[in-house]
Image (cartoon, grey):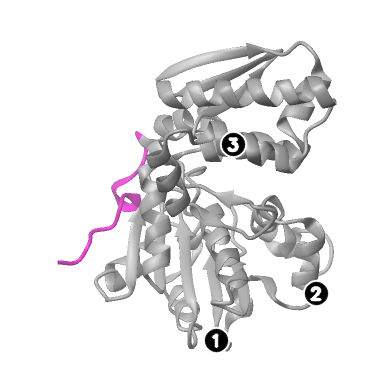
Amino acid sequence: MNEASLTVSNPEEIVALFGTRDRYLRQVRDVVGVDVTLRGDEIRLKGTAEQVKHGLAVFAELRSILKKRGELADSEVQDVLGVNGMINNHHSKQATEESINLFEKARRVVPRSAGQTEYVQALRDNDLVFCVGPAGSGKTYLAVAMALNALRQEMVKKIVLCRPAVEAGEKLGFLPGDLLSKVNPFLRPLLDALNDMIDYEQVKRYMERDVIEIVPLAFMRGRTLNETFIILDEGQNTTTTQMKMFLTRMGTSSRIAVTGDITQTDLPPHVTSGLPDAINRLSQIDGVAAVYLTGRDIVRHRLVREIVRAYDDDISPATRRPRRKG
């Protein structure tokens, strides 16, 4: 692992370099593959020697544009990443093949680890994909990106995102407000992922037209969803009965992604989680895939990987990876 740093003493320059809501920073991370953090007036880069070299070249070019024009445009950042982010032709071709095109102002989401690449390929090749992994490994984010890609290529007509309304220590009845207000905190992570990829106004229009629907798992009962990309987040918090109910909502030309972390189940101790049970039952069926991400696939703050590793020692045998049939 190699490291390098840039000193940027002007806070306004840092804001301009990183972009609104850090969107330019995320693009550099996605395309170059380098980890970028800010410590005081230092931008620190960490990755392979090639990634760090490319990252330094990208920031040098962006700073040069800022010095000349005083601001950065989206097109300029894309141009710089096209030149400096993927200098090696083989790397450029590979990144293009693996990336997920959002058809949103030339935005692409690029898998940042071998596990994430396997996951994206599984989503492309199968109608039902289970993904198990720790917090920050990209399970939900990549599934949402693939759903948007399918929608904008007209492979599906609708996206449905759902979660079980089960969280540690809280009950819906004790939360303030009406039903929508009560379930909003549980569904918020899915909406955050959407807003990170496409403009807020576009998300709003999709939701008003019922093209994108975000619902609690309980609201799925009795429905049949055709030509829909359906994502179940926090699947470890479903019971076996709930998981069966959810999976059987799948209609003609639909696809399902189920994500979860089986080490963070919030179900009562005596209740069996539906996620490992479903993987055991279904993973050998043609068109069904199960992908396991690990700490090596965590792409959030560098400390998240260390936090997950620190807690892994306390995982009970009951929450470890389920066996595979065959």
Secondary element at tag 1? loop
Query: Up-down: is 288 above or below 168?
Result: below
Q: Which residues are magenta?
A: 313-326
Other-residue count near label 1 (Cα within 10 Å), few / some / many at <14 / 14–19 / ≥20: some
Dot 2 or dot 1: first in sequence order is 2
Q: Position of residue 200 (x, y in %)?
A: 79, 57
Other-residue count near label 2 (Cα within 10 Å), few / some / many at <14 / 14–19 / ≥20: few
- Residue type, mark 2 in image: Glu
Left or right: 285 in relation to 294: left
Query: Mark 2 highlights which residue?
Result: 208
The quarter holding residue 41 reads top right
Other-residue count near label 3 (Cα within 10 Å), few / some / many at <14 / 14–19 / ≥20: many
Screen quadrant of the N terminus: top left
Q: Is 67 or 219 nearer to us in this picture? A: 67
The answer to whether residue 313 of the structure is visible from this angle is yes
Screen quadrant of the C terminus: bottom left
Question: Distance from label 2 to label 3 (Cα)?
Answer: 35 Å
Question: Distance from label 3 to label 1 (Cα)?
Answer: 38 Å
At a point 73% along the width and 42% down the height, the residue shown is 74
Examine the residues drawn in magenta and state their main secondary structure.
loop
Secondary element at tag 3? helix
Residues under numbered marks 2 and 3 in contact, where contact means CB atoms less than 8 Å apart:
no
